[in-house]
Structures are given as structure tokens and as C-alpha cells.
Image (tube, helix red, strand yellow):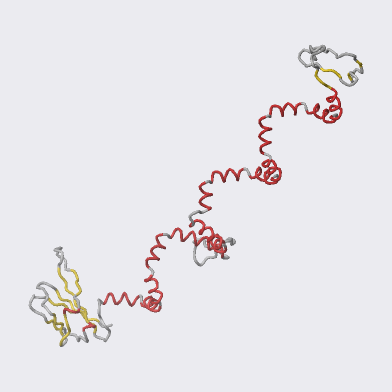
Amino acid sequence: MAITTESFNADGISKIFTLASTILSQSHCRVDFYYDDDGSGTATDHEVPSNVWDVINNSIVFNDAPTDGYVVKITSSTDGEGLDTAPSIYSDIASIINEIVTVSDNTDNINIVSDNTDNINTTADNITNVELIGNDLSNDFEFIVDNGSITEEVTGGSTTSAITTVSNNIANVNTLANDLNSVDSKITIVATDIANVNTVSNNTANINIVSSNSTNINTVATDIVNVNTTADNIANVNTVSSNINDVNNVSTNIEAVKDVASEVFFTDGDESDDFGDVTGFAIESERYIDLAKTRFTTPLDCGDLT
């Protein structure tokens, strides 16, 4: 690119600045004003918009005369290449022309990115969580990402991704979600009483024992009145238990006990009725005591049995 630059001092009156070199068109020119805009004593460059000047007869013609004291700098391309900006910028563009071509070839993807900037920003704000998910999903591959060099193989075996496991069981996940969204959520009820749930969990052995004896438990429940009666008389029950051998002997000889009981009667007080602590008794049939085999003709006064 052939570039020429010419400078002129503005006087506040002149509008036309003619160049010695040929001006091909407005697109082949750039016009700048140099002036001190902040009082520092140093002139700075200010590009002049093309809508306030034009090219006529190889001259730059302004709509209004540049301010007195301004330096008008005119840059033009003389070999046919357009010049809409400073030559230094063109050099920068030329140095990255391959990247510009790549961008141009991928405008569709760039537009997609542009249309989703909000999502991209959200992702960037939560990049830590994204990395956690990425590390989990990497377990589905032969090599697990270790954030080292992208060209280096990562050592270590593969495992099962937790996210993949959830995905494979999404029906169950949805069932749980639907329950949580319901008014009478069972999960919420359990969570509210989690202390009781933990108590049950810690006593599963006892619960299993109860479960295996449910028949007996149902029997007890059916006879709960008798159970309560037994509980109210537990002292007597304990007495019987401590004398169980005697109880068993009586049970074994119950018929003999019945025979003796049928022969025993209380006296009517006509004869010898002072028996101390125990009411006197007599043998009605043949009037004998079986153990001693002793026959009496009158009722026997035994006095205190003890």
C-alpha cells in the first residue's frame, strides 16, 4: 500500500486543502485534526468524520472551515487500496488477517454465542460448579481430566459418573420430585419426623424380632383384657411362679384333690367347733382321715391347724 501524508495549518477561514498527490476517492483518504484539547500544551489526534468533508478536484473540502490553530493532517492511498482508517491500524489488521478469516468463516457460531450471552455469563459466574460436573462426567471416559496439559494423557482408571447414574434413574428422580411438589408429600412428612425414623433405624433388630412373632403379638392384642388383668395381679402371678413345683404337683394329683374336697365339710357348731384359726372339719363318709387311716365315731376337734 502506497501512503502519502500532508499537513496544513488551519486559519479558521480556509475550507479547501489541495494535495500534491492524487486522491483516488473519499474512501482512500483519512482526515485528522491535531490540537490541544485539554490545555496540556500537547496536540492530540482527532479523526474527522467523513460526513463533514468531501473530495473535489483532488482537494479536501470541508463543510465548515477548521478552527484556527488546528493542524489538518490528510492521509491518502495512491495505489488503489481503500483507506478508511490510519495506516498503523491497517498494519495491525494485516498481521491478524488469518484470525479475521477464521472469524468470518464461523459467523453462524459467533451469532449463536452472541444470542446466548446471558447464559454464557451465568455459566461463567458458576464456573466452579461447572468444573465439578465436568470432573464427574469425565469418569465416563477412559482418561480422567486432571487439568494438566491438553496434549498429555491423563493416568488413572475410569469410574461411573454420578450424573450418569442419576440420568439412568431419571424416572425415580421424577417420582421423588413429584412427591416433593405435592401438598401431602410423604418425603416431607418423613423429614419432619426424622428423629423417630432414626430411632426405628437404630432398632431394626428388635423390629425384625417383633415382625417374626406377629402371630403371637396378634394373639396378645386379641386378649388384651386378660393381659391387663394379669398385670393387675402380677404379685399373685409371681407367688404362683415361685411355687410352681407345688402347683404342678397339685395339677398332677387333681383327681385325688377333688375326691378329698368332696368328703370335706365344715361343722355346724353342734359338736367341738373350736378349731382356732382354721374352721374345723370332719370326715362325713365313714368319718376317717385318709392319711392316718384312723376312724372316729364323733367329730374330731383338731384345734389350731398350725
**Nearest the camera: 27 or 178?**
178
Above or below 220: residue 146:
below
Say which of 67 and 18 sits in front.
Answer: 67
Q: Is residue 72 left or right of residue 200?
A: left
* Image x and y of residue 287, in percent: 89, 18
Q: Is residue 213 above or below residue 152?
A: above
Where is 105 relative to 284, above or below? below
Left or right of 115? Residue 8 is left
For residue 290, what is the image quadrant?
Answer: top right
Find residue 160 and report its image quarter.
Answer: bottom right
Give the residue furthest to the left: 13
Q: Residue furthest bottom?
A: 57
Taking the spot 52% from the left edge, 50% from the top edge, the residue there is: 189
Let me know if residue 211 appears in the view: yes
| Residue that appears at 37% across and 67% down | 117
Between 235 and 42, the one nearer to me in the picture: 235
Number of numbered markers: 0
Q: Position of residue 216 (x, y in %)?
A: 71, 43
Q: Residue furthest front?
A: 270
| Percent of width and height locating residue 242 | 75, 26
Front position in the image: 96 or 289: 289
Residue 306 visible here:
no
Residue plotted at (80% across, 28% down)? 247
Quadrant of the image containing the C terminus:
top right
Quadrant into which the N terminus falls: bottom left
Classify residue 154 as left or right of residue 236.
left
